[in-house]
Image (spheres, coloured by chain):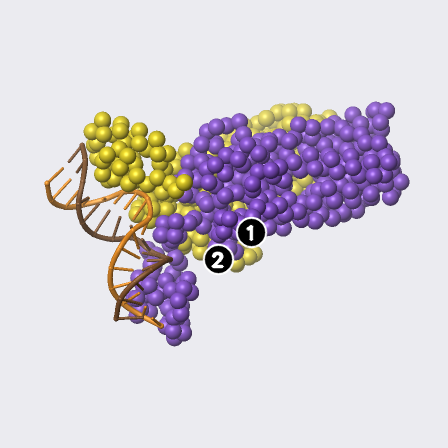
Chain colours: A purple, B yellow, C brown, D orange
Amino acid sequence: MSRATLKDVAAHAGVSYQTVSNVLNDHRSVRPTTRERVIQSIRMLDYHPNQAAKALREARVTTLCCVFYGYHAEDIHDPYHNLIQSAFILEAYTHGYSMTTAFLDSKSPESLESFRQAFMQGRFGGVIVVITGDTLAAKQVQMFKEWGLPCVLFDNEPSSLGVSAVTADYTQGIFELVNHHVSKGRNRITLLIPKDDLASSAITRHNAYIKAVQSHNLPHHIVFGEWSFESGENAFYEVWNTEHRPDALLCANDRMAAGAILAARKLGVRVPEEIAISGFDDFEFARYTAPSLTTIRVPYDEMARQALRTLLGNLEDSHAPTQTTFLPVSLVVRESS
Amino acid sequence: MSRATLKDVAAHAGVSYQTVSNVLNDHRSVRPTTRERVIQSIRMLDYHPNQAAKALREARVTTLCCVFYGYHAEDIHDPYHNLIQSAFILEAYTHGYSMTTAFLDSKSPESLESFRQAFMQGRFGGVIVVITGDTLAAKQVQMFKEWGLPCVLFDNEPSSLGVSAVTADYTQGIFELVNHHVSKGRNRITLLIPKDDLASSAITRHNAYIKAVQSHNLPHHIVFGEWSFESGENAFYEVWNTEHRPDALLCANDRMAAGAILAARKLGVRVPEEIAISGFDDFEFARYTAPSLTTIRVPYDEMARQALRTLLGNLEDSHAPTQTTFLPVSLVVRESS
DNA sequence: CTGAAAGCGCTAACAG
DNA sequence: CTGTTAGCGCTTTCAG
């Protein structure tokens, strides 16, 4: 029942247990025949090194934590979370790490305190911070740094904090969308984007939009929402009955775009004939809206893997330079534009 | 920078480090004044016991794992996962445990192998198994038992496996729904439910439906779907153009119900005048469909907390009797019925 | 009531 | 190439 230890393996293979350790970490050269015998014993005894002992001895934890910060119920619907979380976990496993998860509520000091406690207890050695909703990362990440907690920002640009980040080239994506709409003859392109969201990915999209329409000498017009399906629906009603009625609605995410498409249908507005609608994310449901959604594919899974590798890099070499990685995005043209 | 240890605290308080340990675990009586001094030192040095050392010494891990088994991409949209996961984590924290997550793919031996490896390495001491999609729990849970991995089933009844489970009283919920529809004068009540899903929660709902309509001397009629929004939409088209056109559509979850409501709107069918539609779950979006959704509220968060406490109970006393807990559900009447 | 000593399973020096 | 020794931070005997 109880698990095999190094000593059990050593006894079984007829060597000292340090030799087994050497084989495991291929630390010093072991005679091939001995090595083979040890490996056999490891297999036969179904031996797996005890992580607690390893962590204690090496003063190094092989557990990481995925932090959803500023998490709140409304965002639960977003496919985003599960998608990136499972990508983190898979990538961590392949590097011999495991992954915990924390949901930090920006308004709850207790959630933050129990998180800090877990870190101080050595439950994880580094974090990937995923900012959700209307929260500014800066303060929090600053605090993590003060704790000595290595971290990598996911899907956010670190303004000037000395931390690494992995995100996507949202500017490129917005330009591709605007160019696409313009190439289809649209010239009243309205942006639908959250107003109070300080996450840099929103700001980036916002600024890129302004630049992109200006580059075509087109006016910009912006309506504000809040990332949700319902918000997209309401925004469409609002924007359709205005003097600024657009011929293209560029939604900052897929969920708002799906809401807008539904609203158009309810009003009997034909998409894309009367108005083009585009999203941003390329979640699975973008293929199932009616009409199907033109959007920007963001490689969240690849971003997640990259973020994890970046964190591992920082962990192994604490003086590694901080770097921000931008992964390319791509335009996916479907029926809605 | 480096964290304080027991010895640091002892030195600071002027006692031996074993005394500090005694204070922490209030193991043997320590003189109140000494105790107070130690507690002061702990606070001043911001001491937190090293979990790796504790785990090594006590041969007991304070990390649990939440296993999403049979997970696949289509289910990603379900709010369910984040909901229960964050409930697990919060409850675990309050008991001094932390939580990892694993996504096990029934079709991927590798995912299972790396999971087993993590367990053998002592990365977690028990699991809560959440079955997703078309998977039979039995075989897997049997395997966990053989590994010596304590586990509790979530939202599934263990047919006869010797494991504890926490689920909800789905039979009660279905009866309440059927009674409700009947009380509104409906007498052609059709059930929409996945066919190939062997998860017991689907079977339970199915059987309860049959019994419930029979108790009113009504005929039963069932259409098959697959839990998704799109599936609900398609099922509605199918069921509406049949000789069995129902006056109430009882959907086995909220997502299918939301899809059915959308389909009704597309066809110009008035809900609830021409047909009542009900869901099952009471996810947040049930309030936002148009018309809003009559459904059964399932207390997933409370179920999650209960499951975690059950697991902890099994961990502390490995001879604790296995038990299945059924939490009550409640009918939530909104506009769609 | 408090201190000394042993050891959980492992790695990393050091000798042989 | 292999074995000896020490010690990571903690709990738990056992003596004082």
Which secondary structure, mark 2?
helix
Residue A290 location (% of width, % of height): 78, 40
Label 2 in the same subunit as label 1: no
Residue A268: quarter of image: top right
**Disc 1 crowd, CA 10 A, few/some/many (<14, 14-19, 20+):** some
Give the side of residue A313 with respect to residue B321, left or right.
right
Q: Residues within 10 Å of mark 2 (few under 14, many from 20)?
A: few
Give the position of the C terminus of chain B as an image quadrant: top right
Give residue A206's quadrant in the image: top right
**Mark number, residue A223:** none
Q: Residue A273's spot in the image, x, y percent? A: 87, 38
* B35 is higher (above) or lower (below) than A289: above
User: What's the amino acid at mark 2?
Assistant: Glu
Residue B131, compared with residue A17, is above or below; it is: above
Q: Is residue A144 rendered to the left or right of residue B7?
A: right
Q: Closer to the camera, B109 or A129?
A: A129
Location of mark 1 (residue): A309
Mark 2 to mark 1: distance in Å? 22 Å
Q: Nearer the viewer, residue A75 or B337?
A: A75
> Nearer the observer, disc 2 or disc 1?
1
Res A54 visible: yes
Q: Which numbered dot is residue B113?
A: 2
Residue B272, horizontal then vertical, whole percent = 71, 27
Residue lying at 44% horizontally and 36% vertically, measured from the top left: A116
Query: Chain ID for label 1?
Result: A
Residue at 44% of width from left, 53% of height from top? B118
Q: Indicate the chain on which mark 2 is placed.
A: B
Residue A291 as seen in the image, left or right of residue B309: right
Give the residue type that dot 1 points to: Arg
Which one is nearer the viewer's eye here, D7 or A255? D7
